[in-house]
Image: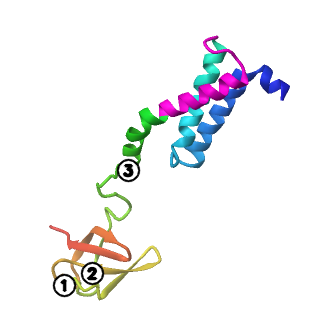
Amino acid sequence: MDFIIQNLPQALMVLGIIALIIEVAVLGLSTIILLFFGLSLLITGFSMSIGILPDSLTTALWSNTVVTAILAIGLWKPLKKMQNRVDTKPVTNDFAELTFTLDDDVTDQGLTTYNYSGISWKLKSEQTITAGTRVYVMKKDVGVMWVKPVSQ
């Protein structure tokens, strides 16, 4: 304990970095509170190391309390808005260029199946497509591939 008290600014900065690593790497910025606390530990430790604040446990406690509150008030709404942002564009993946020839007719009822990558997928189409037609996957749902004829 004497070692920590003698090196309080450095100990606070190390604890701040550990808190930030846990928040970002382990929790994925899900709590945000640990982010404010880690930043306040870094700010307080840095302020003590350059001589702005005296290096005492009482100063560390009060400084962290005040700085955490200021960071929470100032950054809560922007960070919450950032967390709630949803990307609505469709995801491209290995289905994007999948084309094949139909063995059976395809309708919007999903009665036809196609085996791909070890999974039996239901095939659906907005229009009836006859067997023997070359199609491509235009979108996919859970267990369903929506197909369209390939235009020549």
Q: What element carries label 2?
A: loop
Total labels drawn:
3
Q: Are marks 3 and 1 in contact (CB under 8 Å)?
A: no
Q: In the rendered view of the protein, which quadrant contains the C terminus?
A: bottom left
122 with respect to 51 (left or right): left
- Residue 67: x and y in percent read 54, 28
Q: Nearer the viewer, mark 2 or mark 3?
A: 3
Mark 2 closeness class: few <14, some 14–19, many ≥20 residues within 10 Å: many
**Disc 1 target residue:** 130
Mark 1 closeness class: few <14, some 14–19, many ≥20 residues within 10 Å: some
Q: Is mark 1 on a helix, strand or loop?
A: loop
- Residue 33: x and y in percent read 54, 42
Question: Is 64 a magenta residue?
Answer: yes
Q: Which amino acid does label 3 sit on?
A: Asn
Front-most of 130 and 37?
37
* Pointer 3 or 1: first along the chain: 3
Q: Nearer the viewer, mark 3 or mark 1?
A: 3
Q: What element carries label 3?
A: helix
Q: What residue type is labelled 1?
A: Thr
* Pointer 2 or 3: first along the chain: 3
Q: In which quarter of the image is residue 151?
A: bottom left
Name the residue furthest right: 2
Q: Which amino acid does label 2 sit on?
A: Leu
Q: Are marks 1 and 2 in contact (CB under 8 Å)?
A: yes
**Disc 2 target residue:** 102
Which label number is shown at residue 14? none
Which label number is shown at residue 84? 3
- Residue 143: x and y in percent read 38, 77
Front-most of 52 and 62?
62
What span is in magenta?
51-71
Q: How much space separates mark 2 and mark 3, taking CA atoms? A: 41 Å
Q: How much space separates mark 1 and mark 2, taking CA atoms? A: 8 Å
